[in-house]
Each structure stands twice: as C-alpha cells, then as structure tokens.
Image: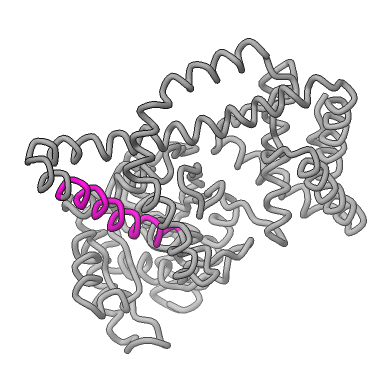
Amino acid sequence: MSALEVVTERLLALYYPVRELRGAPPSEGVYIVVCNHPNGLLDPLLVRLLLRRRPGFLAKSTFWDNPLGRWAMESSGAMPVYRAQEADTSKNERTFQRCRDLLKGGRWLALFPEGTSHSSPTLLALKTGAARIALSTLAEAPDLPLRVLPIGVFYEDKAVFRSRAAGTIGAPIPVADLLADYRVDPRRAVDRLTERIEQGLGAVVLQGETEELRRAFYAVAGWVQARAGTAGGAAPRGDVAEREARARELAERWAESDDMHRGAAVAAFQQFERRMAELGVQDPLAVLDPDPPRVLARTLGLLALAPIAAVGALLGWLPYRAVRPIASRMARGNTDVEATLKVLLGLVVMTSNYLGIALVAGLAAGPGWGLELLMVGPLSGYMALRFDERWALRVEALRGLWLARDADVRDAMAREREALVRAISPAASPR
C-alpha cells in the first residue's frame, strides 16, 4: 500500500468515523465489485475500508491529464476508462485487458457502473463495462470462479464531516452460465448480465422518487428501529447499516402502494419536519423520554475536557471552519464531490496551519517550543473536534430533557411519529 493510500484512507476514516458493513465479503472466488456512486473519489476509498481489501479500480481518464492526478491514480492502483465525450474510447481495450489480467491473477476489481458520481435519489442507467469485462475475462479463462458482487454504499449526510457511512453486500451474481451465449451473441449476453447487475445493485441501494422521500424512509426506519430496541421510547442513533436496510424495506413497500397513500405519506413527513423545527429539535429522532441524571452527569463529564478542547480550538478553529465554505464554493452545488473537496482541502489547510504555528513558535521561542506545538496542535485539535461533536449531542439531550417536562408536548411528538410511521408503511407501525 502506498503512502498516499494510507493517508487518504486515514482521512476518510476521520471524516466518516462510523463505517458499518452489512453482510460478509465472500472468502473464496474472484469478484468484480459493482457499487453505486454518490460521493466522488471517496466511494472507492470507502469500499476498500469496508471490504478490508484493495481491489483494482477504474477511474475516468481525465484524472491522468495532469501530473498530480496521474500520480494519485497510479499510486492507488486505478486504471483509466475513456469516455466518448472526453477521449478516444478505443483506448479502453487496453484498460479492459489490464482488468482481465488482474482478475485472471486472482485479484478483485471494483467499478461504478453508473459511470459518473451523482446525487440523484435513484440509480442512473448502468453502463455495460462491468458485464463486458466479466464475460470477456471468462472467455479467456473459462474455469475462473468469477462472479459479480453488488455493494450498496450509503452516507447519512455525505457532505457533513464526522457523519456515518455504511455498505450492504448483495447476493453474488453468476456469470459463467452466460458464457455460451456470449460466444454466439456477445451483445445479447452483455445486456442480460447488465440487467442482472441492475437488479442486484437495486436491491442493496436505498432509493426514493425524491430526496425528501429517501430522508423520510431513513427517518422512519430509525424510529421503528429505536422502538424495537427500547421499551421507553428513546431513539438512539442505532446501527446505521441496519437502519438503512429497514429504510430499503420501507421503500419497497412504498413502491407497492397507491398514489393516494403516497401523497398522504409525503404530507405527513412534511408536517412532522415542520413541527420538529418549531420545537427546536434538529434531529427528528431526538429522545422523547430522557434520563435526567444520566444526561446531566454526561454533560458535566464532558465539561471537564473543555480546557484541552479550548487549546485545540485556539490553534485550529479558524482554518478548520474555513474549509467548509471554500469546499462548498468549489463544488458549485455538486454535493457528490463536496466531501471529496473537504477531505483534500482539510489535508492541505490543516497541515499547513500546524506546520506554520510550529515554525513561528520555533523561530520565536526556540526549536523545543516548535516541536511541542507540532505535537500538541493536531492532538488538541482532535480533542476539540470530539468535544464539539459530543457537546452537540449533549445540547440535543438537554433540549429533549426540557421538552420532556411537558407531557402534552411529549405525547404530541409521539403521536405524530406513530402517524408518520403508519403513513409511510402501515406494516411497519409500532406495536
């Protein structure tokens, strides 16, 4: 593994500290991993971390157009794919042969058959590259135990630093049974395998007709999950992979409902979000029945860390806060690349910040101070980050504690939640 890969994967782990995988990767065989593509260059890094292995990747050829991009792609083991709007597609045959050689050597390959990163609430039409590579590889090595493995990747809020991510492994897709057809009619066999991939990937990706509906499915899934796991009605954040799976079940039931039911569900979700906003609840799954002693004890314990966090904030708050607006401006509304830009900018800005502070301290007070601040800066900065996260949760808990003192408000919130669950899917209503 190259130094660049180590650094970028550590940065991704920092950006998405909770990463969960639903299902176990196959232990035997050779696989072409196919994934949805919602989050730019961070998607292949997330897949590698979830699988705990380094499959080869395909990336658009424009990354090779400059020396820095070429170095980054080659260092991570990526291979260029040439798109008609950008390059000579005849060059793809050389890339595909590299893919075939990699697979015949027993390594895995991963790619994103939608062909581009996007923020659409549904999958885009799939390209045929995965099917073409799979079948042409088997044509050269018929005995290779090759199959396609769909993995759905999911981000709670992909552009938000320190949010959560998950992956779901789907059922392996057979390829070998199409080899005879491929030798007779390659195009027909490729289309059939692409249809299988579309079905397999669709089964592990949370989709909705609109982004609002996707959020509704996920919100309701979390509330049902909390009700199933706790007797008192509290709503912990829960297992993100399990919650996403529940949301997909809701989406499937939704697809089978009639138009009147769908309209009522959308209206219920909109009303619920408005009521939560009026009450000052940022998280629609905020605790309804908090434990006052526990909330207060955790709040006081967190305050004990405030001095260390204050040092970190003093040394790094301004550059840290500058990364988000700069990245958002550079992304120009494209949320699928915003997180990628934040990671890269954060690496450059924060590293430069701590090096600059150490250099100034070393020149002003001596090398010892410079080295000390070079160590203290990042460590205290991390503590400040953790303090900020936990303090936000404590504030939500205190707000929930304040709301819960009013039985009428608490009961109204509970009733609206139950109504929302019934509107999204009657079969998922809490009992």
The residue positioned 46% from the left and 71% from the top of the image is 115
Q: Is residue 341 magenta?
A: yes
Give the residue at the far top of this rendering.
Answer: 293
How far across and down, in percent of the image, does residue 243 sit? Answer: 61, 37
Whether 376 is drawn above or below 328: the answer is above
The residue positioned 26% from the left and 64% from the top of the image is 78
Q: Is residue 200 magenta?
A: no
Give the residue at the far right of this rendering.
Answer: 260
How far across and down, in percent of the image, does residue 412 sit? Answer: 88, 30
Whether 306 is drawn above or below 372: the answer is above
Count the marks: how many? 0
Whether 414 is drawn above or below 319: the answer is above
How far across and down, in percent of the image, does residue 34 sit? Answer: 44, 58
Say which of 359 and 179 sits in front: 359
How far across and down, in percent of the image, does residue 15 sit? Answer: 40, 46
Main SS of the magenta segment? helix
Q: Which residues are magenta?
A: 339-359
Colouring scheme applied when the structure was drawn: one colour
The residue positioned 35% from the left and 69% from the top of the image is 133
260 left or right of 132 in image: right
The residue positioned 31% from the left and 51% from the top of the image is 30
Say which of 366 and 13 sits in front: 366
Q: Quadrant of the C terminus?
A: top right
151 left or right of 206 in image: left
Say which of 203 and 289 sits in front: 289
- The quadrant in which residue 63 appears is bottom left
Say which of 84 and 28 sits in front: 84
Give the residue at the far left of this rendering.
Answer: 367
